């Protein structure tokens, strides 16, 4: 499983989604007070971008119709009919690394 350096941890502020693109695929990366999570950026309902929505605790919200996604599991609430993939994020002393398939 490749590890992709996605840059300094300081670029990922607490409580805000950040879009990361790797080989044309979009990921939404979240910092929940020092724990980092990544999910597919594209909402399965109608294509909203989770990286542009809000996050409270470990629940991020799609900016289009407010679907909730648990960034730990990828489980999505209504109006989504399916869930999203999650991806591990690790860090060294300065940078974050996205574990992609
Ligand atoms: S596009 Fe995300 S909830 Fe509708």
Image: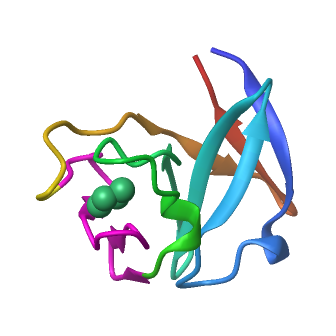
Residue 99 in the image: state x and y as whole percent: 62, 31
36 lies above or below 88: below
Q: Give the quarter of the image for residue 51.
A: bottom right
Q: Position of residue 4 (x, y in %)?
A: 79, 33
Q: Residue at x 20, y 48 (%)?
A: 75
Quadrant location of residue 82?
Answer: top left
Q: State the residue in front, 49 or 15.
A: 49
Q: Is residue 63 magenta?
A: yes
Question: Left or right: 98 with respect to 82?
Answer: right
Quarter of the image that includes the C terminus? top right
Which secondary structure is most common in the magenta stretch? loop
Above or below, comparing residue 87 to residue 71 in the picture: above
Q: Nearer the viewer, residue 41 or 39?
A: 41
Say which residue appears at 59% left-offset and 84% top-offset.
14
Going by the image, does 60 lie left or right of 18? left
| Horizontal and vertical percent position of residue 52 | 58, 70
Mark yes or no: residue 29 visible.
yes
What residue range appears in magenta? 55-76
Q: How is the image coloured?
A: rainbow
Question: Considering depth in this image, is 7 or 27 the residue closer to the camera?
Answer: 27
Q: Quadrant of ligand 1?
A: bottom left
Q: How many marks?
A: 0
Question: Which x, y percent locates residue 28?
Answer: 57, 54
Can residue 71 be seen here? The reply is no
Q: Which of 12/47 is in front? A: 47
At 35% from the left edge and 72% from the top edge, which residue is drawn? 61
Is residue 6 located in the magenta-colored stretch of the structure? no
Quadrant placement of the N terminus? top right
């Amino acid at each position: 499983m490749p590890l992709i350096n996605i840059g300094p941890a300081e670029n990922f502020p607490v409580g805000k989604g950040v879009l990361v693109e790797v080989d044309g695929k979009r990921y939404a990366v979240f910092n929940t007070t020092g724990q980092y999570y990544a999910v597919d950026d594209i909402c399965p309902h109608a294509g909203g971008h989770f990286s542009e929505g809000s996050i409270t605790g470990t629940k991020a919200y799609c900016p289009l119709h407010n679907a909730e996604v648990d960034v730990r599991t990828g489980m999505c609430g209504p109006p989504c009919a399916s869930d999203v993939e999650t991806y591990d994020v690790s860090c060294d002393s300065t940078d974050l690394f996205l574990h992609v398939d």
